[in-house]
Structures are given as C-alpha cells and as structure tokens.
Image: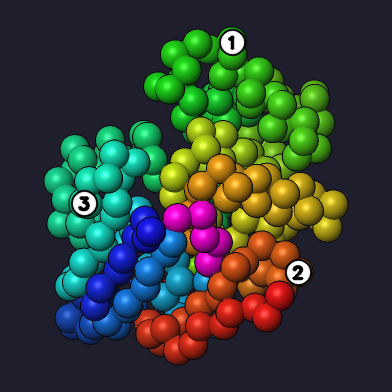
Amino acid sequence: MNIVEVRRLSKQFELHILKEKRIQALESIDLDIAEGEIIGLTGKSGSGKSSLMKCLYRTYLSSAGHIFYRTGQGRVIDLASAGDHEIIQLRKTEIRYCSQFLSVIPRVSAVDVVSEPLMPILKDRAIAQEAAKDLLERLGLPKGLWDAYPVTFSGGEQQRINVARAIISRPRLLLIDEPTASLDTRTKDVVIDLIRSLKTAGTSVLCISHDEYVLDRLSDRRLHLQSGRIVHSIQPSL
Ligand SMILES: Nc1ncnc2c1ncn2[C@@H]1O[C@H](COP(=O)(O)OP(=O)(O)OP(=O)(O)O)[C@@H](O)[C@H]1O
Ligand SMILES: [Mg+2]
C-alpha cells in the first residue's frame, strides 16, 4: 500500500525583488511512496530536490497538485491543502524531516535536542534521554558532548544530532536531506543501518543524497530530478 501519492505537484517561486521573475522549482511531479520503501532522490544542485521534500513536509505550500498521505489510522489527508493544525499533528506523530543543516536551538543540550521528539510519545524525560544517549552512542558522538550545546559542534557532529533527532521517534514517513554529507564511512554505515532498521519496522523514507555509497546501500529505488521534473526512475537490479 502507498503511504504517499503525489499528483501533478508544481511549485513556483515569485521573486518580487526581481520584477516578478518566476522560478519553476517543481513541474507536474507524480510520485508514489510505498509503505516501507526507501527512495533515493538525486539530481543536480537547484533541480528541486529540497523543494519537493519541503512541499511534502509543508514548509512550502505547493502551487498546484496534490500530496495524498495515508495516516496510521488509514485516513487520507492532502498535505498540499490540509489545515495547519492537521499538519502540526502529523509532524508530531508521523512525519519527520531532517534538513540539510541543523537549525540549532540555543542553550538546549545535545541529549535534549535529540530526545525532544519522543516526549509527546513517552511523556517521561528520563526514558526519552536514555533513548537519545543510546542513539548518540551508536552514532559515535563523544560522551563529553552529550550535555553540551550543539551550536559549537563540528559539521559532522551537528549532522549526527540532526539524524538522531529525525529518527528517534520512529516516524512512519522520514524525509531526510543529505544525511551523510560530512560523515566518515564508519558513521555513514551506522546511519544506513539505523534507517534500514526503521524500514524493517515499516517506515517509508525519501532520502536526498549525492553519495553513491549511501544510495547503493540504502535505496530500494531512485528518482532523478532535472529542472523540477522526474526524468527517470532506476530500480536497482539487486
Ligand atoms: N524559498 C525560495 N525562494 C525562491 N526560490 C527558491 C526557494 N527555495 C528554492 N528556490 C529555487 O528553486 C530551485 C530549486 O531549489 P532546491 O533547493 O529545491 O534545489 P536542490 O535540488 O535541493 O539543490 P541542492 O542540491 O543545491 O540542495 C532553485 O532554483 C532555487 O533557487
Ligand atoms: Mg537541497
């Protein structure tokens, strides 16, 4: 069964400062994501990958088309037109987005940044923090940093916080933008293992990456974007 069915999705930006110049970021995208499927999304810089992901997460409002999402309870919600309240609920319970860069929350420790998405589910800070520490340990973040503020962390350390925060609550749909760009191979392998174990539990994943190493090991299927259109879909022959 599909968890997401995108139909004729378009997104354009109007740049008012440039005399109403328009950028067509996405053009009539059709895309199905099956339950438990991992899709690798590729394409040149500027081809629309992050825009597609942000339309799914509703950071961006689509200009046209539909994004049908099937909830855990079997309800179908059009993410392109649903009310903000509904979107906020889905973000709390089912859909997680991991951005290209960590947007750090000032004066919140690494453990708290990572455990925060679990709080509405577990309602127990100590247990949520244990789960966060467990993940940080697997991702090789030095123990000395667990109680520190991620604002001073290196790129790769921040990226691990970002990934841990996105997966800790085991979302039904994980949208993940370049999760491994600043990681060494050993840590990439851990991220790949963690995401694949979510898949085993039924999570569907859309993962933007330029990294062949990661795409080969992670994705069930690849989609390639060119100038806002899906140009081909590659099914690995494994
Ligand atoms: N908020 C915005 N306002 C105006 N234009 C935007 C906005 N977000 C994206 N764009 C434009 O839409 C196009 C697609 O951008 P997008 O960020 O989706 O590309 P991308 O494939 O993720 O690139 P990269 O690999 O560099 O991250 C680009 O031309 C970009 O300038
Ligand atoms: Mg991008």
Give the left or right position of residue 123, taking residue 125 as reference.
left
**How far across and how far down the image is residue 49, in percent?**
45, 71
Location of residue 69 with respect to 130 vertically, above or below: below
* Between marks 2 and 3 in the image, the one whose residue lies nearer the viewer: 3
* Between marks 3 and 1 in the image, the one whose residue lies nearer the viewer: 3
> What residue does disc 3 label?
77
Q: Residue at x 42, y 64 (%)?
A: 33
> What residue does disc 1 label?
126
For the residue marked with disc 2, what is the amino acid?
Answer: Tyr
Give the left or right position of residue 206, taking residue 185 as reference.
left
Q: Give the distance between the C-alpha atoms of the residues marked 3 and 1, in whole angstroms.
A: 34 Å
Give the left or right position of residue 197, taking residue 213 as reference.
left
Q: Disc 2 or 3, which lies upstream in sequence?
A: 3
Furthest residue in direction front, as rendered: 1
Q: Residue at x 64, y 23 (%)?
A: 131
Is residue 233 at all visible to an observer of this figure?
yes
User: What sort of colour scheme is used for the picture?
Assistant: rainbow
**How far across and how far down the image is residue 186, in percent?**
85, 52
Q: Disc 3 or 1, which lies upstream in sequence?
A: 3
Tag 2–tag 3 contact (CB < 8 Å): no
Q: Give the distance between the C-alpha atoms of the residues marked 2 and 1, in whole angstroms.
A: 36 Å
Label placed on residue 114: none
> What residue does disc 2 label?
213
Q: Quadrant of ligand 1?
A: bottom left
Give the left or right position of residue 66, taking residue 143 as reference.
left
Is residue 43 at all visible to an observer of this figure?
no
Q: 10 Å neighbourhood of mark 3: few (<14), some, or many (≥20)?
A: some
Q: Disc 2 or 1, which lies upstream in sequence?
A: 1
Q: CB of residue at label 1: within 8 Å of ligand 2?
A: no
Along the line of sight, the residue nearer the viewer: 22 or 9: 9
